[in-house]
Amino acid sequence: MSEDRKKEIRDLLSARGYMTVEELSKQLFVSVPTIRRDLNELSRKGLVKRVHGGASYVGKDSFEWSLDLRNRVNLGEKKRIGQKAAELIEDGNHLFLDAGTTCHFLARALKPSIKISVLTNSIPTMQKLSENKNIIIECPCGLYVPSHLGIFGDEAASFIQTRHADFYFATATGFHEETGVTLRTRLEISVKQAMRKNSDCMVLLLDHSKMGIKNYYHTFDFSQIDILITDAPLSASLAEKCADQGVDVIYA
């Protein structure tokens, strides 16, 4: 049980970059002293970095955070963001949806009568979209990653470059006024950048846990973002940066 909990701690830190002891305690339903002991042990093994009040993830190119875990974190926030994003979509639109779980919630929020075409590299999102016979669905070829139930890599990016979308709905693991949009792993970057390059409008879907996070891999500048949809007020510095760079912020 203890080892399973430590694995979950690493998964959560991999997902968010940093969490406080109190956040981990609430997420895993164990006491604060238990979390402190686990973090100290993980820190001694070099698996996390212990910092004041919490811990951060160690590892520059991890792809271990499974879809199952992502589907258990901030579900209410992601659902609201997905519903708000769905309001932007009209009949006849062509969409790119990346493999983020918030994009899956967007797919779930689409009206049954909507008539659109969607390209996505997420297997669960494709399956959800397939329930609506009015939606034309495409998927790229490329490297299949079972833990994420998605298709990634340069071959997938090359496929996307032969298509064009009105909207690219994007997700990420970090958003900071100094670094813009960042990811923990480089494997996703080529697909995300191809979607951005070949779309008219990029809509960034991020819940509050991604704000103020700096991940290792820079992915998008502020100038590439048209709209940000999030669930909680931004920090003053991040809100100012979005305003300066012309990013339209919508709250769900």
Image (tube, helix red, strand yellow):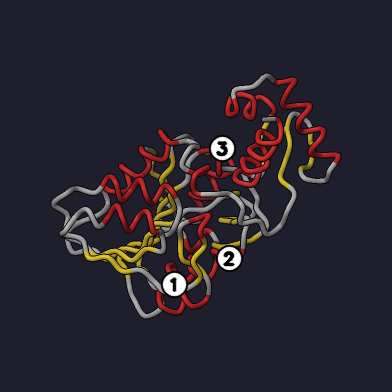
Q: Which residue is mark 3?
A: 235
In the figure, 81 relative to 128: above or below? above
How many angstroms separate mark 2 from mark 3 (CA)? 29 Å
Q: Disc 2 or 3, which lies upstream in sequence?
A: 2
How many angstroms separate mark 2 from mark 1 (CA)? 17 Å
Q: Amino acid at mark 1?
A: Lys
User: Looking at the rendering, in which quadrant would you find the N terminus?
Assistant: top right
Work out whether residue 153 or residue 168 is closer to the camera in this orientation and state it.
Answer: 153
User: Looking at the rendering, in which quadrant would you find the C terminus?
Assistant: top left
The quarter holding residue 41 reads: top right
Residue 38 in percent (x, y) is at 76, 31
Work out whether residue 141 or residue 92 is closer to the camera in this orientation and state it.
Answer: 141
Q: Which residue is mark 2?
A: 187
Q: Is residue 214 left or right of residue 129?
A: right
Residue 105 in percent (x, y) is at 35, 45
Q: Amino acid at mark 2?
A: Leu
Residue 147 in percent (x, y) is at 53, 55
Q: Is residue 98 left or right of residue 39?
A: left
- Badge 1, how many Cα within 10 Å: few under 14, some, many 20+? some
Report the residue at 62% width, 46% height from top. 213
In the figure, 78 relative to 107: above or below? above
Q: Which residue is mark 1?
A: 197
